[in-house]
Image (cartoon, rainbow, N blue to C red):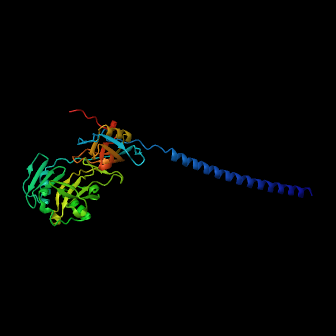
Amino acid sequence: MTTRKDNSLNLTTFKDYSRKTIKYGLIALVAYLVLRFLVGSFTAYWKATHPEPPPAPTVGFGKLPALNFPASAKVPASYRLETANGRLPDLTDRLKVFFMPKSGASLFDSDNAKSIASKFNFVFEPEIINERTYRFTKTEPLVSTFEIDIRDRVFNFQTDYLSRPDLILANKLPSNYDVASQVKTFAGQAGNFGPDIATASAQVSYLVSSGNKLEPAVSVSNAEFVQVDINRRPIDDIYQIYTQRGYEGVVHAIVSGFFSSGQRIVEAHNYYYPIDYGQMHTYPLRDVRTAWKMLQAGEGLVVNPGKASEAVIRKVSLGYYDDMEGQDYFQPIYVFEGDEDFLAIVAAVDPQYIQIQLPD
């Protein structure tokens, strides 16, 4: 009898312990899951609000040469910031800098230049301006000159189209797509294009002649010429390219609709220099507020001052500077845009990584 009672007590005790074990085990499991969720949430929040700093800029090219801005023809008397939120934007503190290789001299430079000129129907011997510059001329169908750097193959093609009112008669301008394609084919005959310009989009605008100059057309219907500007594709598909002439492209052309398609281009400039995108380093940038103060102090380049004495700035961004005269490195700039087509640029790389320019 005693054994049966003890067995009953042991079974009851075991069941009691089992219930308690399951109960407290479930409580512990729930507590563990809740704690794990809280710890995970806090960790995610901490990482989001305290991100690890990016690696330091590589600055592998050492100190860079200063950007070669021309002197501003005119600057406003004052500036006023009128962005959407009334403040300067928060921009990145570093950007890429790319190496731009130089073309070495070759025994075939002269022959290559003559071969390129022949593609533009310049067949006579050139005038040698200096050891790197040849000038070719012809008189038909327009009085024309073709001036080329025999080493880098950048060129200027110019005609007397502004003194030929007959070019406007029965003028049928090509479509945007056709004209961009024609300009790329024409300028690309120099053989110096890379994919960054060959596949870039074109900016097309319409012009009318006024004496010996061109002015924007009121509408496409009364346009007499088409202007085409092509710059490299934006860096990282974000940062636009600017020259010392602002939005004017390193490939720039004026197109007439008077001649056949092969002779429609009456002015063209190819200022394309290659970039080695494989040789790249990151560099720290001066603060945007410093760039804003520099602009106000008369530093940088005012490409278009607008018409008012006070420039109203609506947009501040980062871009890249493409010097039409060539440069050693492709560097970032701050870009200030505003009312009445105001446009100015300021060098962006931190000045401690810029070579000091000694006075001449």
Looking at the image, residue 7 sits to the left or right of residue 137; the answer is right
Quarter of image, res 352: top left
Residue 77, image x and y in percent?
A: 29, 40
Q: Residue at x 46, y 43 (%)?
A: 53
Quarter of image, res 224: bottom left
Quarter of image, res 6: bottom right
What is the count of numbered marks?
0
Q: In the depicted view, which residue is nearer to us: 111 or 336?
A: 336
Looking at the image, residue 222 sits to the left or right of residue 9; the answer is left
Residue most toward the top? 359
Pick the quarter of the image with the N terminus.
bottom right
Residue most toward the right? 1
Residue 174, image x and y in percent?
A: 22, 65
Looking at the image, residue 15 sits to the left or right of residue 93; the answer is right
Can the viewer see residue 105? Answer: yes
Residue most toward the front? 308
Residue 64, image x and y in percent?
A: 29, 40
Residue 84, image x and y in percent?
A: 41, 49
Please determine whether, in this image, residue 64 is positioned above or below residue 44. Answer: above
Please determine whether, in this image, residue 113 is positioned above or below residue 93. Answer: below
Pick the quarter of the image with the C terminus.
top left
Q: Residue at x 18, y 64 (%)?
A: 257
Q: In the depicted view, which residue is nearer to us: 243 or 270?
A: 243
Please determine whether, in this image, residue 297 is positioned above or below residue 324. Answer: above
Q: Which residue is drawn at 60% across and 48% down?
A: 39
Can the viewer see residue 277? Answer: no
